[in-house]
Amino acid sequence: MKAITFNASIPRYAFTLLAGRIQREAFFRGPLSPIRFQEVSEPQLINENWVKIKTIYGGVCGSDINMIFLEDTPYTEPYVTMPYTVGHENVGVITEVGSKVEGFEIGERVVADPMLACASREMEPPCSRCERGDYSQCLNMLKGTLPPGLNLGFCEPVGGSWSECFVAHKSQLMKVPEEMTDEQAIMIDVFSSALHPVMRNLPADDETVLVYGCGIIGMLVTASIKALTGARVIVVARYPFQAEVARGYSADEVIIEKEVEDLYSEIAKLTDASIIEPMIGDRHLNGGPDIVFDCVGKRDTLNDALRMTKSGGKVVIIGLVTEPKEIDWTPVWFKELTIRGTLCSSTEEYDGKRQKTYEWARDLIMSGKVKVEHLLTHIWRLDQYVDMIKTATTKGNTGCIKQAFKF
């Protein structure tokens, strides 16, 4: 079957990194590029607790684009098994069922939560994190019946959704309701990645939140906050089409960054804060939003988030921060800030109910509280992966929000 695979040996990595500085297409078209469109064997059931899934949609995550352009640090390399088939966002149809799988049948539509934690690795007893439902913090991602792999799409024998089929453990499966469309179902994973940090850092109704960055995650963070709380939400968007989506999710104020002279002045005005100007160095706010969700994860946005957040407030980092240089961390101790990270999804509690983030995402979509299907703006065949990559890097010209491969 055809698949998009990734194999970053040291020679490939070094050559592509160098060639990519000269010609950006070397990252995905070069002779030694780690990314490949090629023929691979179908993954087989790991054991009788697994199912095989024929892919309907394989979603494109920002982390996938980071991977293609080698923007990740070596930190996570031990948590993958290469070469692997790319793709963790998924919806598909079960085509094979292991004899020990109950409650799922051939022909049913499912999404697979991509985390390969204790249950899918069949670790008994589970680690302390998985036992309490914090699957994204699993301590056994290098152990069990699987080789190293953070999740589906990074573990060689499991496969990934950028191919015709993949396999999943019974613990990962969630049925897609009959009335839910495929286009809604493929959005469950990215929605969960926004819901997880929001539900773990739920703003109070009287708090002001800054959502910094309005790509797909920033949009859905905004939607999550407005669906679950009465908090005031200020969104910083880069493009007008992103601003329109944020307004559609009931953002209270939306700032298009390119249309204002000074972002600090805008935030200060909206939060009744004052701008402090040191003799040398960057400015900061006295006051500001109670919580900042950094949905970009670059040096400038993280630096601004620390400097804009109100004393005693919180900065939640959702963007894939790697090695930002020359950040002054003084605001962390001076303002007594809380810094929180986030990974994928897990288990959340809200209004006295506790369930997986995937289930919360499903319920919010099915209830109509959060509409998501309009965010799927670009659909591709697998052999159009070069066009997909180029589109991901030209959002301002293409109006791209969310992309997926359709099979």
Image: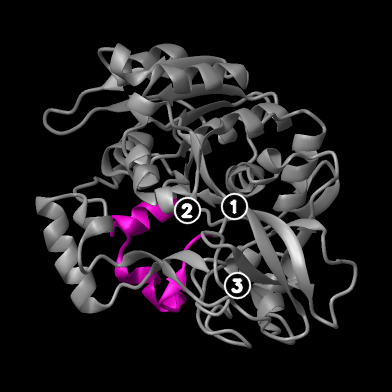
* Mark 1 element type: loop
Q: Report if the CB atoms under discs 2 and 1 are less than 8 Å apart.
A: yes
Number of marks in picture: 3
Q: Residue at x 13, y 50 (%)?
A: 23
Kind of residue at badge 3 = Cys
| Residue 284 in view of the camera | yes
Residue 382's disc number: 2
| Relative depth, front residue between 11 and 182 | 182
Q: Which residues are magenta?
A: 63-87
Gap between marks 2 and 1 measured at Cα: 8 Å
Residue 114's disc number: none
Mark 3 — residue?
A: 138
Kind of residue at badge 2 = Leu
Lower sequence index among marks 1 and 3:
3
Q: Residue at x 70, y 45 (%)?
A: 185
| Relative depth, front residue between 91 and 294 | 91
Mark 1 — residue?
A: 407
